[in-house]
Amino acid sequence: MEAQKNERRRRKFIAEIRVLHWQPNAGHTVNSQILAEVSQCVESINGVKEGKWKSTLSFYRPVVKEQANAAEFPRDFLGISLPEQPNKYYFVLRGQRLVVEADSNIQTIMEKLQSYKTRVALNFEGFQYQLGDFQLRVGKVVSIQSESLRGIVMEMEYKPISSWEKSHKIMGEFFDIWQEALSKRPLPGHFVHMEPNFGEFGLSGQYTLQHTAVQYATIMLQMIATAQSIRN
Amino acid sequence: MQHQQHSQPPLQLAGNFIGSPPESQGSSTEAPPKQVAVAMERLANAARLIADIRLGADRLLEALFIAGQQPHQIGNNKPVNLILQEGASMRQYLQDLRAIGRQLEDSGVLNESLKSRSNSWGLHMPLVCPDGAVVAYAWKRQLAGQAGASAVDRTRLALKAFTDQKRRFFPHLDEKSVDGPASKKQCGTHTSTASHQEELSDLKTVLDVLTDLEKDIPEVKTSTYQRLDWSKRASLLPNDTFDDLPKDHNNFQSSRNIISDSRGAITADQIGVIELLIPSIFRAVISLHPTGSLHPDAVAFFSPDEGGSYVHARGVSAFNVFRNITEHAAMAPQHFIGLNAETALYSLLHWICNYRTLFSKVCSKCGKLLSMDKESALLLPPVQRPYRNFSVSKHLSQNSSSKDLSMNDIPAYHIGCFPQE
């Protein structure tokens, strides 16, 4: 069985990783109680905890000598590291609809160049569950600086096949099953999946980690908007 | 081949055992576990000798066959020499076998009265059961309840081996006149028309069957391999070679054997493994036994992205969905052979291709795609498609398109939704 598992990791393609984020009801915020309930719900549909996972996301701002030039630089510049590819780093410029896969040492280069500084850094971390042929990740969004809980994200993946088109229906049903299971618990909010317009980013029909990066970038936008509306 | 040179005195069980056979004489020289071990070893040697005898018989038949093919060749004494050689070896094997048999009898293993003893606690020497299986302790056998099942299996294998040999060495004994029970067992639910039967009997080789399959189901990609070549291929999976293969419809052999191209195209009688790929859905591996025949004997399903030495007709996928289909399909080859051995491969492959709707066709009972299987606590799509009443019926219409095969879209069921008969 071990040999099988090792041979299995040679998989090159992913069918789809669907990223969800927690949308609290109006007037509510996210807290660790909700996170606990979500994890319990996964286990109630026979999810088996497999291990931990972690992604990091950084908002960059340019280091400019003259303020006047500041407007020339992209305002929405994100960098994301994903657990599936520890030696890669992904950049998303949402305004320009750009996504780039770079080597992970780009972060060192950026630091040496002192061209961009990290404005906000977030960790997505939590546990990974196996539900038969499905993989579920539940993670809290934590600000590295303040260590406060900012949100909850989930990732869903169907492992047996690597065609997005062919797995679409089964992913949809799994999503519905998940939402139904969670709805039985009295929680002040729900999970949302928003599929970004991948075509605008120049991404094709074969799923890649760049698609994941774009999903996270889109979620960030949503989370920021939610946070701002709470403040107002 | 070992020659047993034991000249031990006949063994007797220690006095503690109830019901020790009165036939064994002499003092007990060894403890029962050692006796068991010795007896098991002798039985193993006997089995080896029997295998040698079988092989020898094969060789004799082959030599006779060759001799029959080239009669009256002056100076070609090879077949005659072979026959003499084999005859001598056979005689030696049979002698050795007799010797071992005597030893086993003396030690109380092969003993008529033992078997008839109903009151024994089973703490006897290894038993050779009526159907030829060997067990160390009779009570274990009863617990396992294997007797009937293994006898049926052995008979079936023996019959298959005999039929194959007969077909190979005595082809002039026409198969049609020696109708086996298989072709007579046509179920009433078969709805093939007479002309369809003729078509099916035209599918004489594996390549014919595969060509027909690809015509009916355009999305399937098939290829054939010699048995050893398959393991090389399995280790290279997954790859996308199929997208690059030129589809050469004029030369069926070359388009099918490009993967094993280093040895050149293989001939139909070398085919031991068939691969069916429905791109992005599944890969099925079917083994044929004997090699080159139309008889499938095992099938296994895998993800199209799986690769490695465990991908073969008796292997198990790393994914639950394909593992469950393989389990469900375990008896399908035998079922189709039991109905009609000639068309078994044809039916099996068509049935397998029904799984092309695995991730899209909802369950015919509950109407959903995913369902939590209670027993295994897994979320699975409908992995069970019935094969018992499956038959490939075709409309003999002018425009044969895949639409005609919609009649063959059998229902799909979740494990728990499968109708109980």
Image (spheres, coloured by chain):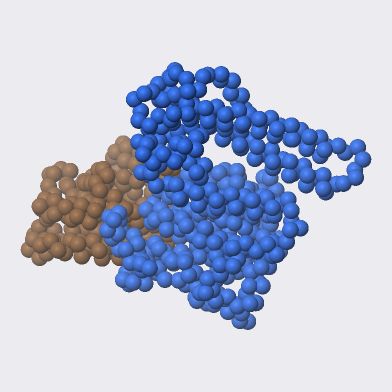
Q: Where residue A46 sits: x, y (%)?
A: 24, 53
Quick check: A225 left or right of A89?
left
Residue for point 52% across, 42% down? B132
What letter labels the chain drawn in brown?
A: A
**x then y, percent, for residue A38:** 17, 55
**Image quadrant where one finds the C terminus of chain B:** bottom left
Residue drawn at (40%, 21%), measured in percent from left and top?
A: B31
Q: Nearer the viewer, residue A29 or B13?
A: B13
Q: How many marks?
A: 0
Q: Position of residue A55 (x, y in %)?
A: 27, 46
Above-or-below relation of B76 to A73: above
User: Is residue A95 shown left or right of residue B330?
Assistant: left
Residue visible at 68% across and 62% down in the picture: B178
Residue B180 seen from this side:
yes
State the residue lying farthest toward the bottom: B398
Seen in the picture, residue A84 relative to A25 is either above or below; the reply is above
Looking at the rendering, in which quadrant would you find the N terminus of chain B?
top right
Give the colour in which the image draws chain B: blue
Can residue A195 be seen here?
Answer: no
Give the image quarter of residue B163: bottom right
Residue A136, percent from left and from top: 27, 53
Of residues B138 and B270, the one nearer the viewer is B138
Q: Give the answer, above or below, for where B250 lies relative to A136.
A: below
Q: Quadrant of residue A6?
A: top left
Q: Residue furthest front?
A: B22
Q: Is residue B175 left or right of residue B344?
A: right
Which is more toward the observer, B400 or A195? B400
Please report the residue visible at 11 percent of the width from the left and 50 percent of the height from the top: A32
Q: Camera-side residue: B54 or B403? A: B54
